[in-house]
Image (cartoon, rainbow, N blue to C red):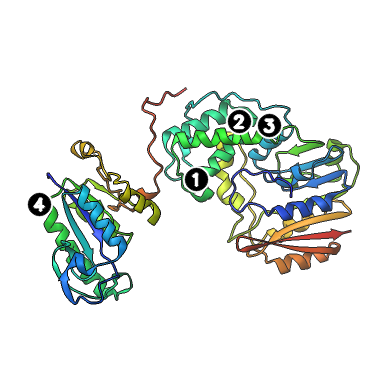
Amino acid sequence: MTYTLAIIPCTGVKDPYMEEGPAQEIWVGAHFQYTLIYVETFFDKVLVMSYKYGLISPTDTIQSYDIDMRVAKPREHIRWWYLLKAQIDKLADEDPPALVGLFTGNFERDRVVREFVKHGVDQLIVPWEGKGIGLRQQAVFDAEPPFDPEKVKRGEYKVELNPTGSATANRYLPPPTKIEEPIEWE
Amino acid sequence: MAEIFRTGYVGGAVPEAIDWMVEQSEGAKTICVPFAGIGRSIVAMARPDTTIESFDTQHYTKCIFEGVFRAKEAETNVDGIHYRKGWAFENRPYKNLDDRCAGFMDWVAQEGTLYDKACLGSAITRSTLMARMMHWKSNVEQFYNRFQKQFEYNKDWLNQPGKFVHHEDNFFNWSVATDLITETGVGFSYDFIEIDPPKVVNYSDTYSLRFEGFNQILTQGVAAKLPKWNRRNAMGYMRKALETPAPKVVFMYVSGVFPPYEDVKKMLATTGTIEEEREFFHQGRTDYGLVIAR
């Protein structure tokens, strides 16, 4: 576990003149483009979550497509999820990263987190959660580091699943206190 | 438009509705408010020559009246974050409520003044998710910060004009013909009554549903259970409240609750003449105000 991995979303905005080519050339949406260059700066490895191919490298050759899994038939949705699940399991078992940065949206994010944790990759961050487009762009232009490498070494980005085996409920937990002194009951 | 008293409750009030109510109460010297809530309308109606008698089962209302509206200055015992194991610590009335926040609220509920508790109530409400009093969303620093903010805000509402007679009790426990007269010395009939009853949202009113734990925190578990309004008894309770003697009544209601507004309006028409009906639109709901002459 020596490297950091970013998983970023693909985009519906594709180059209308390219039928086939490197994924990063076909996907021309601004959000994808600036997210890609941002994570390439801070993470060792980048994978893109595609609704057709699952997890692929931005340099992989793909064919242009028009699929949105959020509105797909349940059968297609599950088929896609099995593909993604198998890829995550293989990655986590054979070449586990020290930290995973998820830049994808809410769609199936909890399942992705759970799958990584179940396979021993328990340091995950969601740097853009709660940030609108403006704040994301600000983070990109300011080259704001999404994580602290020292904290990764110390295992401080560890995610724990709740008793039901889900990561969902943590979203509504109160932020941890910064008071370090133990509670003195009076 | 006059500034209205706020404590962070969900829904809030339409400032125009408060202004309208104040207009209606002009000239009244003795006013009765059977369901005081946070006293928002009462403080708006208060003038140097008014005596306002109010009732509410919530201890929080008493804290606001005695600790803020009637107080000359802000009295406090809170000098920082202290912790004590009390009712909130033992019972955790909100999901995800941590030890520190529970400990702080128990300490203030036990050691704080009424002014402190008035600030605590607001800080508790604002520290829950969407102020719905179900999920706790704050750490102790945020919670204490809200307490301090309300502490400063409440200072603007100290020492209100007129006389306030507030009862921490169920209005229906009082015999109108005897007790009220003894307490206020104002005679058999009030000049004006403002009725803003609890609203039955689904099968129960939101007050008895969500405010039970809140009330128990502030009283550290000694408060009696809040009376429950439901679809079956709500109309009867409203009719009973309308028996209070006064020549003029302002009745506040809202859309989308039980019983429906149309039914309540029909019932009101049997108790007097509806002289005015107003609608106030607010965040997808309609607030209704009716003036009944008797």
In the image, B71 versus B31, the foreground residue is: B71
| Contact between labelled residues 1 and 2, with CB atoms less than 8 Å apart | no
Task: Tell me the CA gap for discs 2 and 1.
Answer: 19 Å
Assess disc 2: are there few (<14), some (14-19) or many (≥20) residues with their C-alpha within 10 Å of its C-alpha.
many
Residue holding disc 1: B128
| Label 1 SS | loop
Element class at badge 4: loop
Any part of residue B218 in sight: no
Q: Chain of mark 3?
A: B
Name the kind of residue labelled 1 in the image: Thr
Disc 3 or 1, which lies upstream in sequence? 3
Indicate the position of residue B205 as horizontal and vertical percent values. Answer: 61, 55
Q: Image point 20% across, 64% down: which residue? A: A24
Same chain letter for marks 3 and 1? yes
Whether pointer 2 and pointer 3 mark residues with C-beta atoms closer than 8 Å, the reply is yes
Horizontal and vertical percent position of residue B62: 68, 37
Residue lying at 46% horizontally and 40% vertically, measured from the top left = B92
Residue drawn at point x = 60 percent, y = 30 percent: B116
Residue under label 4, please give it: A95
Say which chain tag 1 marks. B
Disc 3 secondary structure class: helix
Task: Calculate the distance from the C-alpha at mark 2 to the C-alpha at mark 3.
Answer: 8 Å
Which quadrant: the C terminus of chain B?
bottom right
Q: Quadrant of residue A31?
A: bottom left
